[in-house]
Amino acid sequence: MPSPKLPAERMSLVLASAFLLAVAHLPIAAAGTPVKDVPLMTEAARPPAILAYEIVRSYPHDRGAFTQGLIFRDGFLYESTGLNGRSSLRRAVLDTGEVVQRENVPVEYFAEGLTDWKDRLILLTWQSRRGFVYDRKTFRQTGGFEYAGEGWGLTQDGRRLILSDGSATLRFLDPETYVQNGTLEVTYQGKPLANLNELEFMRGRILANVWQSNSIVVIDPATGHVTAQIDLAGLLGAEDRAGGVDVLNGIAYDAGTDRLFVTGKLWPKIFELRLRPTALLDKPAG
Ligand SMILES: [Ca+2]
């Protein structure tokens, strides 16, 4: 008479049988191997990772600047400011905040996003459907172009201009002809994310302010998915808010030194931030 099996052995037999049954019911991939690691949710619906930040330094910023666009090139900050009658294009010294060059935008225009392409600066306007092109050194206007709808934020990825218009859809424009040649719908946990505002291309990702929020979102340019988020609600202290400030807006990246700068409309400071973990910002493989 065989000795009765111990409960543990019985259990392992039961588990082994259950496992075999389960395997038998797994969907079979084309190659004949069972599909493994079925995700609990789709990639699009996955909550974005939270990037932590630390303030490396802060720099002075003109409290009268209603910041709409911000970039860092050749050691200077270039900034566009909005509001009718107060719209301008500026070159500023980072360390002191001193505006060393300025071109006012005609009063009928409300300036918006700003980026560069080669030796040009390209400026959007809010509802005039008109872009302005300037020589980056002299600030002399060298051209212009028309586009449909509104203009909010502007950046470029080395191949295309990327424009936001307050909706969840980013538009790609040819940087030589300014003709639209593509779009990208931005989604946050699978749902369209509207109010995308100032933009910056950084390490293969699109960073975007979201109007009236204290967060910057990190967008995968291949899918439009928001893969990470930086919560900056605590960035500006109470003493800096005194006197009146508007929303967080303005992102500039210096690729040469891997430095990230952020500010807001009418903010007295520009902050240099260090993000963690930076691997989340790296260009996806492939
Ligand atoms: Ca920017």
Image (tube, grey):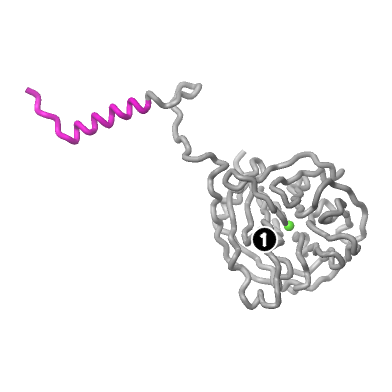
Residue in view at x 76 percent, y 44 percent: 172
193 up-or-down from 109: above or below: above
153 to 79, vertically: above or below = above
**Ligand 1, image quadrant it occupies:** bottom right
* Quadrant in the picture for the C terminus: top right
Residue for point 90% across, 64% down: 107
Residue toward you, 285 or 66: 66
Residue 19: tell me if it is visible.
yes
Quadrant for the N terminus, please: top left
Q: In the drawing, does residue 159 fall left or right of residue 214?
A: right
Q: Which residue is mark 1?
A: 212
Residue 71, horizontal then vertical, whole percent: 75, 59
Query: Is 72 in front, or is 183?
Result: 183
The local crowd at label 1, few if under 14, some if 14 to 19, many if 20 or more residues have their Cα within 10 Å, is few
Tag 1 secondary structure: loop
On the question of residue 124 being in view, the answer is: no
Residue 208 horizontal/vertical position (percent):
68, 54
Instruction: From the top left corner, tell me how far across and down residue 184 is, in percent.
Output: 70, 42
Which residue appears at 74% of the width and 50% of the height?
164
The image shows residue 76 at horizontal and vertical percentages of: 77, 64
- Above-or-below relation of 107 to 15: below
Callout 1 amino acid: Gln
In reply to whether residue 9 is colored magenta, the answer given is yes
Is residue 140 shown in magenta? no
Stretch of the chain drawn in magenta: 1-23
